[in-house]
């Protein structure tokens, strides 16, 4: 006999993130618009930090785009972090500042950024902007980020999306859609509701003084989420702007599987360890914004949420037919499924129609099957710390 309490717990555990997800998606289109006034004001002193690990193939293109956005190239700082290729040499050839870091016992983007901040202590800028080494920044974004971060004295996250290659598969397209839902649709929804957004890792700006109040050093895969949490608890919640854009590249094949494992295992760790902490701090500090941030982070990766709903709804339906439980948990899960479907539909209309035409939606079960081993692996051998990057994987796969 299945315990009704267990089924109720599962039903509520699925209903809460489904409701949050739906509200964020609906707020994207129905809530008041964002105030996107900005200025290309270079009077604010800033440095652009670019953490780079074996990015020789991509760093030149990234720097070319950024150099045209600044008055002085030394405002751009490349952190060649544990590199074994020509990343540092190529960066210096562009006239930017280069810090080389070699510490194999402390691997990860957080350690690289912390190292750079230490080097800048003697002559700190007013604002620090972080851009990944494989990203392209739209014109005017850098100046706008610097000006808004300085004006608002809080962290700012600009729109960050992923570019699909010409050979992108259906799983790549669905992955890109899921990233847009997280980084664009839901972030805009939270901002329009007046609550903090989650930092995306690239295209983010911080007033210098605020960064001194938290620690960036660490090797978590979702260091951007952890930084969001640390800043929020310290009283500096990030906000979101669509007045600019940063575009990254979507990994493919084995690299994509490895990258997604790091991201999603790290997100699950945040749900289990940091969401309760945020809820506690929200109660202790009497701050509803921390509660809303906790609810936002409690929404698991989209494909996992769909899989959890399918499993819970199927089991509840089966147990109800067998007469083992009442129909109430099934009704709760039906409501959760409706909210999840509504949110997904709104998100697809908003950002998915171009990359995912209607007929391709029938391939979503294939994508869920592709993601299933990632989630099962979390319960066997979770990957919640920085191990390898896709740059390390590519040479291995090329030999096969």
Image (cartoon, rainbow, N blue to C red):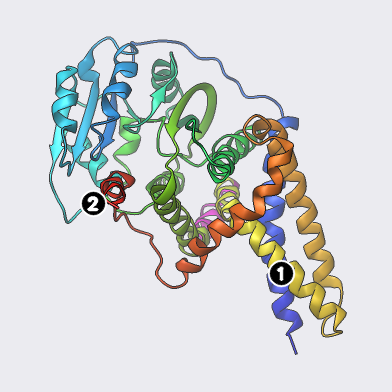
Residue 165 left/right relative to 329 = left
Picture coordinates of residue 134, whole percent (x, y): 35, 32
From this view, report whether residue 336 is shown above or below residue 351: below
Residue at the farthest front position? 400
Question: In the figure, is residue 122 to the left or right of 143?
Answer: left
Give residue 389's position: percent from left, percent from top: 31, 48
**Cα distance in 3D space between marks 1 and 2:** 38 Å
Residue 9 to residue 124: above or below? below
Membership of 282 in magenta stretch = yes
Give percent across and percent down for residue 350. Answer: 69, 31
Mark found first going from the N terminus, 1 or 2: 2
Any part of residue 319 in sight: yes
Magenta range is 278-288
* Image point (82%, 85%), residue name: 324
Please say whether residue 216 is visible from this viewpoint.
no
Query: Measuring 43% from the left and 14% from the top, which residue is drawn there?
Result: 139
The quadrant the N terminus occupies is bottom right
The residue that label 2 is drawn on is: 107
Could you say whether the residue bearing mark 2 is in a helix, strand or loop?
A: loop
- Secondary structure character of the magenta stretch overall: helix
In the displayed structure, 193 sits above or below 66; it is: below
Quadrant in the picture for residue 330 = bottom right
Residue sitting at 68 percent across and 71 percent down? 10
Q: Which residue is mark 1?
A: 312
Quadrant of the image occupied by residue 300: bottom right
């Amino acid at each position: 006999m299945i315990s009704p309490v267990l089924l109720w717990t599962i039903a509520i555990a699925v209903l809460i993130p489904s409701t949050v997800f739906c509200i964020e998606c609906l707020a994207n289109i129905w809530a008041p618009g964002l105030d996107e006034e900005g200025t290309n004001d270079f009077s604010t002193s800033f440095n652009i930090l670019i953490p780079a690990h074996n990015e020789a193939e991509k760093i030149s293109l990234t720097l070319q785009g950024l150099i045209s956005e600044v008055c002085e190239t030394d405002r751009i700082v490349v952190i060649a972090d544990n590199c074994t290729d020509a990343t540092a040499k190529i960066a210096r050839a562009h006239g930017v500042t280069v810090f080389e870091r070699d510490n194999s016992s402390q691997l990860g983007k957080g350690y690289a950024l912390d190292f750079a901040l230490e080097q800048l202590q003697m002559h700190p800028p007013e604002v620090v902007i972080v851009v990944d080494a494989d990203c392209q920044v739209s014109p005017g974004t850098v100046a706008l980020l610097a000006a808004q971060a300085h004006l608002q004295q809080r962290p700012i996250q600009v729109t960050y999306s992923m570019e699909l290659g010409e050979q992108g598969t259906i799983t790549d397209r669905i992955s890109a859609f899921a990233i847009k839902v997280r980084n664009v649709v839901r972030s805009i929804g939270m901002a329009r509701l007046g609550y903090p957004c989650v930092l995306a890792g690239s295209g983010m700006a911080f007033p210098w003084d605020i960064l001194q109040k938290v620690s960036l050093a660490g090797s978590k895969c979702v260091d951007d989420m952890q930084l969001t949490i640390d800043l929020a608890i310290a009283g500096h919640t990030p906000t979101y702007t669509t007045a600019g854009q940063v575009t990254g590249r979507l990994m493919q094949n084995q690299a994509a599987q490895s990258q997604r494992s790091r991201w999603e295992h790290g997100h699950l760790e945040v749900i289990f360890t940091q969401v309760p902490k945020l809820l506690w701090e929200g109660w202790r500090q009497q701050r509803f914004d921390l509660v809303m941030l906790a609810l936002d982070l409690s929404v698991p990766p989209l494909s996992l949420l769909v899989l959890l709903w399918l499993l819970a709804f199927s089991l509840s339906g089966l147990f109800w037919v067998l007469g083992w439980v009442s129909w109430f948990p099934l009704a709760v899960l039906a409501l959760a499924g409706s909210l999840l479907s509504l949110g997904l539909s709104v998100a697809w209309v908003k950002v998915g129609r171009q990359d995912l035409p209607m007929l391709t939606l029938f391939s979503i079960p294939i994508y869920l099957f592709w993601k299933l081993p990632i989630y099962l692996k979390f319960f066997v051998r979770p990957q919640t710390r920085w191990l390898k990057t896709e740059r390390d994987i590519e040479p291995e796969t090329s030999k096969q």
